Amino acid sequence: FYRKLLGSKNHIEITTVHDFTHNFYAPLINKTIHNWLKYNAIKRSKGVICISKNTYSDLKKFCPTNKNQKVEIIYNGVSNDFFPIKSMTLNEQSFMDNLKIESNFLLYVGSRTNYKNFDFVAKMMSKINNFKLIVVGGGDFSSNEIKIFSKNKIESKIIKISSVTNSELNVLYNKAYAFVYPSSYEGFGIPIIEAMRAGCPVVAFDNEVNSEITENKALLLKSLRDEEFLEKIQQLSNQDFRDELIENGFELALKYSWDKCCKETNEFYESLY
């Protein structure tokens, strides 16, 4: 939301920049309109917040600020709704029972736009025996996705959940064999930290921001090759390795809180008075 507000002539303007996805993946007309609004907002602003070092790097590349503007990196937070479950409530158990999953499952959450590389994960399901793939959100499956399921004979392995509460999503993170996040580009990647907060191992693509926020506490794919993905999944069968990865991820995730984000944001705003 980058439009200039009416009557804001004498107000201090601050812009928070989440990512530069449009610069890399949007069609030309969409990118042109979006960036015209975004760049004008950035140039008007006395202060600019970037949600990661990677977003700040893209800011300097695509729309550099001047010496009179203050820029701060303030990481997103993650809800306290995500945590390791010691004992499930009746509602949580009922939620899992209704899914009728009798095997290990991988978990995918969110948009499935091209650069998210969902197709890669779907195809991998034909190579992993006795695993399901639960897909949360992101709208209905496209005709192309359905063709991929059919071609790879994995229709029975895919479970689609249109929407969940945070409590239900926390259950899924807790019960998943791994959370998979093969996206090529992100501004931050909140689901990665949600999974870690819930004690779920993360397998993600080794892009700049995933490397930045996970600090090597996730299994990062250097490339989207079958062999490398299958190797990461196999690594998680070693219980000692798995436990260590979960513990390290949980400790790391605790540093990303909304309280911390709000405190730093408030301090940044006050510094511009």
Image (tube, rainbow, N blue to C red):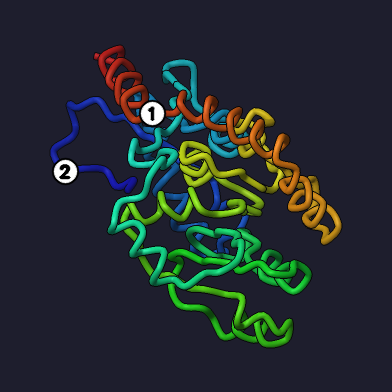
Q: Which mark is residue 265?
A: none
* Side of 186 where 11 appears, left or right: left
* Side of 191 where 115 appears, left or right: right
* Amino acid, disc 2: Leu
Q: Quadrant of the C terminus?
A: top left
| Residue 108 can be seen, yes or no | yes
> Would you name the residue on which mark 2 appears?
6
Q: Position of residue 134 (x, y in %)?
A: 53, 66
Q: Which mark is residue 257?
A: 1
- For the residue carrying disc 1, how many other residues have a C-alpha within 10 Å: few (<14), some (14-19), or many (20+)? some
**In the displayed image of the protein, which residue is found farthest to the right?**
227
Give the camera-side residue of 236 and 249. Answer: 236
Real-space Cα separation, disc 2 to disc 1, in angstroms: 33 Å
Residue pictured at 50% horizontal, 27% vertical: 65
N-terminal of the pair, mark 2 or mark 1, is 2
Give the camera-side residue of 241 and 152. Answer: 241
Between tags 2 and 1, which lies in front? 1
Q: In this view, does 194 lie above or below 33?
A: above
Q: Position of residue 208 (x, y in %)?
A: 67, 37
Residue pictured at 52% horizontal, 73% vertical: 159
